[in-house]
Image (cartoon, rainbow, N blue to C red):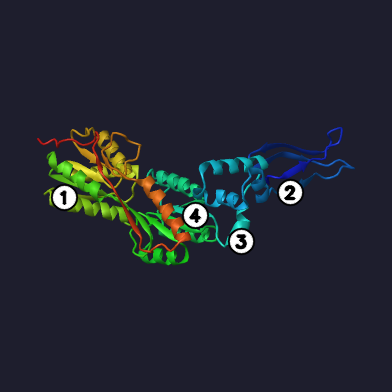
Amino acid sequence: MIAAGFELTFCVDSNYRCGTICDIVRFASHATLICNFPLKLADGCMPAKYTKSPRVTIQQVASEAGVDRSTVSRVYNQPDLLRSETVAKVKAVARKLGYSPNSAARALRTGRNENIALIVPDLTNPFMPPIALAVQKAAAKLGYCVFIGNADEDPSHEEDLLLRFSDQVAGAILVSPRSDQSVIRELARNTPLVLINRDVAGVPRVLIDAGQGMAEAVLHLSSIGHRKIAYVSGPSQSWANEQRRSAVERAAKEHNVKLEIAHAGMASFSAGVEIVEDLLALGASACIAFDDILAQGICYGLTKRDIEIPRDYSVIGCDDITGLPMLSTVSSPSATAGRKAVEMLIYSLKSNLEPNTRMVLETDFVLRDTVGEPNIV
């Protein structure tokens, strides 16, 4: 990779006996040099050389755009303080001149990086991409870049990733962290943190409260005649799993519905398929799964056994992902959680945010095609 502003000069004599065969692909901010193979220099030829052209400065951009240096700086650091027309105009001039902010120099000058980390337990879980996308968009609007780390459902990986990122980021967002509370508090003492879907006192957090939606799901099942249901539990280290199971237990008790617990362990499609035999052995007429991935696996496993949904068995998921649009589920404002977490983190970096700040987002039951009256013989 060659930074913008470099001019490449190749030595090739009139008979094309020396030099380098290459292609140069130019982009807005950099050029990529793809060398197919080098050729040996012929006698008397000078080696290939490059010369570095002067770097475009912030003052040049300001002069060309007719604004102050401080305005150019705000375009890249605090664009929310400027009119959108001003931001667009300055960026257009910057692109024309080939200017790019010197983030390394700015970090040395200000003592802080304009990057944040996003660490998730499993990036392949469809619940995570909407959060990641919302975090990236919200961070970009505030002038920050996002580094994403996948902890692979391993608490030790969460700590390792955060330590690796610590010198490169101003703060971090941990989504559904699996680490012990004591570890999370220790990490928060060293790096500004905001949690999503983990309720740890003393650490700012954004929580998606599935309790309301889960209670509504149990109420609906009870209202159409289900008297025995099952909750399919997810990861044992998941705060969300504990919260969802507790909500189902409270609602089942309130509506006089017998509840059984089936432990799937992992929140995966295959775990959903494998738990079906245990579910059927419980004698329940419906189940509420920890998330939509488990619910999808359960639906597939039931169908493979020629059990028709919802005539013979009702299934409810949680998180409202788009993979199975006919699935009854509990909504999840995951994108909102990602956006609010970024706003909370950036505010904490620039002001004194109360460490015990706690934002709760509500959920609702979404009735679709996988829930029906129990097939009582």
Quote the CA–CA distance across marks 4 and 3: 18 Å
**Labels 4 and 3 touching (C-beta < 8 A):** no
- On the rendered image, what quadrant is the N terminus found in? top right
Location of mark 1 (residue)? 252
* Disc with the residue nearer the chain's start (1 vs 4): 4
**Labels 1 and 2 touching (C-beta < 8 A):** no
* Disc with the residue nearer the chain's start (3 vs 1): 3
Location of mark 2 (residue)? 54
Above-or-below relation of 304 to 354:
above
Amino acid, disc 1: Ala
The structure residue drawn at horizontal position 61% and vertical position 47%, both measured from the top left corner, is 67
In this view, the residue farthest toward the left is 377
Q: Is residue 360 left or right of residue 161?
A: left
Q: Secondary structure at mark 1?
A: helix
Quote the CA–CA distance across marks 3 and 2: 21 Å
Q: Secondary structure at mark 2?
A: loop
Residue 159 lies, in percent from the top left, at 45, 61
Q: Secondary structure at mark 3?
A: helix
Amino acid, disc 3: Arg
Location of mark 3 (residue)? 109
Q: Residues within 10 Å of mark 3 (few under 14, many from 20)?
A: few
- On the rendered image, what quadrant is the C terminus found in? top left
Q: Judge depth for marks 1 and 4 and give the one in front.
A: 4
Q: Judge depth for marks 4 and 3 and give the one in front.
A: 3
